[in-house]
Amino acid sequence: MKKFLVIASLVLFTSMQVNAKDVWVNNLRSEFLNNSSVIYAINIRTFNAKDKDGNGIIDFEAGEESGNFINAIDRLDELKAEGITALHLLPVTPVGKTKALGTAGSLYAAAGFDSLNPQLKSSSVDIPLEEQARKFIQAAHDRGISVIMDVPACGSYDLFLQSPELFVKDASGQPVVPADWTDVRLLDAGNENNINPDVLRVYKRYVDFVMGLGVDGIRVDVAHSKPAKFWKELIDYSRKHDKEFLWLAESSDSWKDPVSPKAVYTPYDKLLEAGFDGYYGSYFNLKNWKTAKELQAQVNLNLSLEKKLKEPKSVIGSFTTHDELSPILEKGREYSRMIMWLNATLPLNSYFVDGFDTGDKYIYFWANQKAKKTYTDDEYYFAHRGKIDIFNFSRKPGGKDFELQKEFIKANECKTIVKNILKDGTFKFLKTSEPSVFAYTATNSSQTVIVIGNLNFRESYNNVKISVPKITKETAVMPIVLKNIPFINKGKIVTNLAGGETQVFIIDKFSIK
C-alpha cells in the first residue's frame, strides 16, 4: 500500500512538472530591465496577409485574405528562428470609419477600448474573435515570445459621437484634433490635479481586457499626452495582478511640446517616475547625428536613469519605428546594418518593425490613389511614403534582402553574448581619431566586445585610430562583423571604414578597466 502511494505520488509530481512547463510565466519586465528583449512590432492586419496577385492590396472578392490572429500564427516560427523574444502588436482595438484615413481605417483611430478589431477575425476557424486572439498569444508564448499590446492615445470620431463626454472640446463644443491627426480626437484625461474618471475607467477596462487575453505588457501611444497621475493609477492597478507586467511609454527626451494647446504635456522622466519601465529615448535621431558625441550623450543619458530615479529603468532602440522612414530609404543598406548592431550591442532593448529584417522600403505604388473599394468614408488609399502601412488592407511587409536577414539573425545571436557581458561588466565609449566615428566597449572580467561605426554615410576613412587600453598585437581578436583586417598595436586599433560601416569584435580573456 505504501509502495503504491509512493508511486502514485511520483506520477502526480511528474505530471505536475510536465504541466508546469506548459504554463506561461510572464518575466517580460525583468527581461526588459536587463536589456534582454528583442522586440518586433507587427500590424496583425498585414502581418501574414495573402496577396495572391501581388498588387499590394487585399481583394476579398478575389479570395485574398488580410492578416488576422489565426494566420499570424504561421509566422511565429520564423520570428523565433530570427531571435525575436517579444512582439509589439500595433493597436488591435476597433477602428473608426468616419472622417477616416485609408480604406480600412487607421490602427490608432480607436472606436473602442474594451474589444478587438473585427477586421482581425479569421473565417477559417469557428471560434469567437477573443478566443482567436488568445490562441495567437498562447502560440507566441509556446515559442517563448512575449506579447505587448498597444493602447491608442486618442479616439475616433465615431467614438466621439457615441461618448462625447470622453473628449476635449473647443469653444464651439467641437472635439479637438490633436497635431495634424485629422482622423482622431483628443481624449480628456484631465490634469495632475483633476483626473477625468470617465477616461480613466475606459483605460482601466482596456487593462482588464488585455490582461484577460494573456498579454505581458502595454506600449502606450503618445504617453506624454496624459498626466503622470493618470498613468500611475493604471500601472499600480495592473501590478496588483502581475508584477512582471511591462509598461513602455512612447515618449522621448527630445519631445518638448504637447500634441495640442489644449493637451497636457508630461515629460518622459515624470512618466518613468509614475511607473513606466522604459521609453523611446531619442535614438530615432541617429539619422541626423554627425558626431560620436551625439550618440554618446544619448547613451549616457539613458544609463543615468537608474541613478536619477533610484530604480531600474530602460529604453528601446527606437532607431526605426512605424513612424520612421524605412532605413533603406533614409541612408541605404548600411544604415539598416548599423541599426542591427547598435541594437545588439548597446545597453538597451532591441526594437524592429515588421519587414526591417529583409529590407522592406514600404513603397506602395497604389498609395494615395483613389481606391476601387473602401471600408471607410475615405475613398483614397491613404499612406505615408516609406513607412509601414497602417491605414489599408495591404500586403504582408517584407523585402527580398535575405543576406540582410542572415545578418539580422547573427546580430540577435550576438546580443545574447553582449547582454551577459553588460549585466556583469561595464560599458564605456572609446576615443577615436575621427569625430564622426564612434567606438565603445562592453567588458567584464573575461570577455570584451568592441563596436566601431562611421556616422558619415558619404565618406570613407582610412587609418582611423581607436584607443583601447592594454590591447596589443598578440591580443586574440575574433571579428564578428568586418570588411577588412584592422591593424592592432600597443593600445590602439587602426582600421579603415567605408561610409556608414559598422565593425564588431569580441576578445576573450581580455578586459578594459
Image (tube, rainbow, N blue to C red):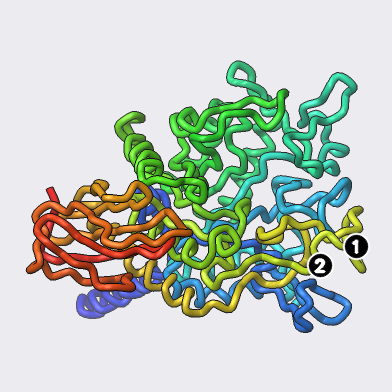
Give the secondary structure at mark 1.
Answer: loop
Q: Residue at x 39, y 45 (%)?
A: 291
Give the CA distance from mark 2 to mark 1.
8 Å
Relative side of 224 to 485, left or right: right
Q: Residue at x 25, y 59 (%)?
A: 450
Residue 311 visible at all: yes
Give the secondary structure at mark 2.
Answer: loop
The x and y percentages for residue 476 are: 13, 70
Q: Amino acid at mark 2?
A: Trp
Looking at the rendered structure, the number of numbered marks drawn on it comes to: 2
The x and y percentages for residue 126 are: 74, 74
Q: Report the front residue among 189 and 57.
A: 57
Q: Which mark is residue 81?
A: none
The residue to which callout 2 is attached is 366
Q: Residue at x 72, y 53 (%)?
A: 107
How would you rate the neighbour count of disc 2 (Cα within 10 Å): few for under 14, some for 14-19, many for 20 or more?
A: some
Q: Amino acid at mark 1?
A: Lys
The x and y percentages for residue 47 are: 64, 69
Residue 502, picture quadrant? bottom left
Q: Is residue 420 above or below residue 292?
A: below
Q: Residue furthest top?
A: 193
Q: Is residue 93 above or below residue 85?
A: above
Q: Report the front residue among 482 and 63.
A: 482
Q: Which mark is residue 370?
A: 1
Residue 24 visible at all: no
Q: Report the front residue among 3 and 20.
A: 20
Q: Is residue 108 above or below residue 336?
A: above
The x and y percentages for residue 377 are: 91, 53
